[in-house]
Each structure stands twice: as C-alpha cells, then as structure tokens.
Amino acid sequence: MADLEEDTGKPRQVIFYKAGMKDDVYAILKSVAIHEDLTYVIHANGRLLRSWDAEINIFSAQDVEAIVQIVHAKQFCRGCPLIDVTNSSRVTKKVGGRLHHNDCAVLTDADKEVCAACANLTKSLKRKATSTRSKRKVPVAASALRKRLIRATAARERKKADVKHLSEKLKNALTATLDDIIKDLPEVQKMAVRAAVMQQAAKSPRGHRYTADWLMVCLLLRLTSPKGYNALSSMRAVRVMKCVRQFSIYS
C-alpha cells in the first residue's frame, strides 16, 4: 500500500507499507519511505534499519519498485529461544518470548529464519550452556575415592624410599671423598675432622651422637687431675697413660 503526503510546504515523500496484526493490534509491519530527493528509509517492526544489504540508488520508477519488492520478500528475524541471560548487553527481549541481538537486522532473506547477528548469538548461548553443564560437579563413588587414596599412598611411599636411597648414596659418596682427602693425617686428627663434618651436617645440634673414639679423646683432653686418671686406671677396659704431660706425645 502507498501513501502520498499532502503538500504542506515541506519536502514530500511517498510511503509504501505493509500492515497487519502485531500483539493483537493492527499496525504497520514494514514500510519504505521515498523522499523527494530520491533517498529512502526502511522501517520494520517499529525499528529504523540503519544498514541495508541491497543498496539501490533511485533513478527511475523501476528502482522504486525493486526496493519495495525486496522489502516485501524479506521476513522478520525469529531470533533465538528465550533462556536465562543475566546482565547481557548484547541481547534484547522481543515480543513472543524470543531474544534478538542488539545488532539484529530485523529483516532477513526468505530462506533464513534468523539474521547473521542472531545466529552468532544462538551459537554463543549454546556454547555457554554446554560449558556450564560440563562444570557441574559429578559425584564420585566411595570405592573410586578409596582406590585413588591407595594409589596416592603407594606413590608417596615409593617417593620416600627413593629420597632415603638417594640420601644414603650421597652420604656414602661424601664419606668416601672425605676419607680420600684426610688419608695422610694422623688418626686423632682424622677423628677431629670427621666429628667437625658430622656436626656441620647435623640437622639439629641437640642429641648429636659422636663416635666412641672421638668421645674418648675429648675425655682424655679434659682429665687434668690424678683422681681422674686413677679412676680410669681402675677400669680394665681403658689403658691410661702415666701422666697428663705424656698425652701430647701421642696426640
């Protein structure tokens, strides 16, 4: 249907429109307004279409007819199903319980139910729904948890055994290297070096156990009274030197 505005002194325009029922109200569904300067605008579903995929310049009546036929052949974009979308600036609720992208073309080709923007929106919402379902916690049976615990405990014990084995191996290697270094020293000095190294390697200074030979040397160094030597002499298992002065000869 076409309508020609009355001559009011303003630029005149011709409007081609299609009317029908919308929300139980008779309204204009689509319209093409041809201005006096041969420019035109298209309205659909109450919205001005700012972009148009079939730009046609008007030079004759055939061009006007072509524009009207193209708009008439278009159908309204159906959008995507209405789902729970929270605080999304990309969608707008439309009539009929459907969602449309803010950049919805409103009109689409007859062989397509939705425009490109709404089609991308539908794919995005489907991916979001799939991702939400995949993140839900799935209950695990107690038997499966028990098996996991057994495997984890066994793995921990193996790791502890490996660490202990490597510690012993490193300790033996350090001992062998130390023995090679101090092999030319006197025996008493060897014991002193070993005791010093053991003291440095100890994790805690308390409760450190020295070798029996080194303890005996330390004990003899601190005995300066005849009573101490007499006490040691009474012990058959210990051989005591004649006097303190002679200790330096053997040390």
Image (cartoon, grey):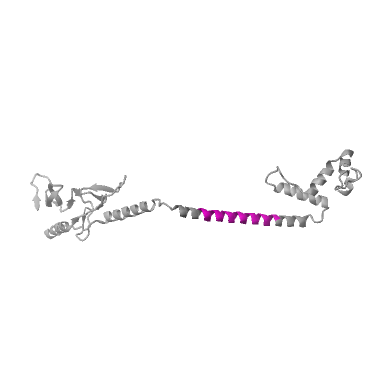
In this rendering, position of residue 243 left or right of residue 119:
right
Please, which residue is most extreme toward the left here?
6
Magenta segment: does it hold 150? Answer: yes
Where residue 114 appears, as percent x and y from the top left, is 24, 56
- State the image quarter where residue 87 is shown: top left
Q: Residue at x 81, y 44 (%)?
A: 218
Where residue 231 appears, as percent x and y from the top left, is 87, 41
Q: Residue at x 79, y 50 (%)?
A: 191
Q: Which residue is drawn at 32% across and 54% down?
A: 124
Where residue 251 appears, as percent x and y from the top left, is 86, 48
In this rendering, position of residue 140 left or right of residue 121:
right
Q: Which of 165 and 11 is in front in this view?
A: 165
Where residue 141 appears, as percent x and y from the top left, is 43, 53
Q: Nearer the viewer, residue 164 or 61?
A: 164
- State the image quarter where residue 243 is shown: top right
In this rendering, position of residue 42 left or right of residue 186:
left
Q: Nearer the viewer, residue 168 or 132?
A: 168
- State the image quarter where residue 61 is shown: bottom left
Magenta span main SS: helix
Magenta segment: does it hold 50? Answer: no
Q: What stretch is highlighted in magenta?
A: 149-171
Q: Could you tell me how many numbered marks the image carries?
A: 0
Q: Residue at x 29, y 53 (%)?
A: 121
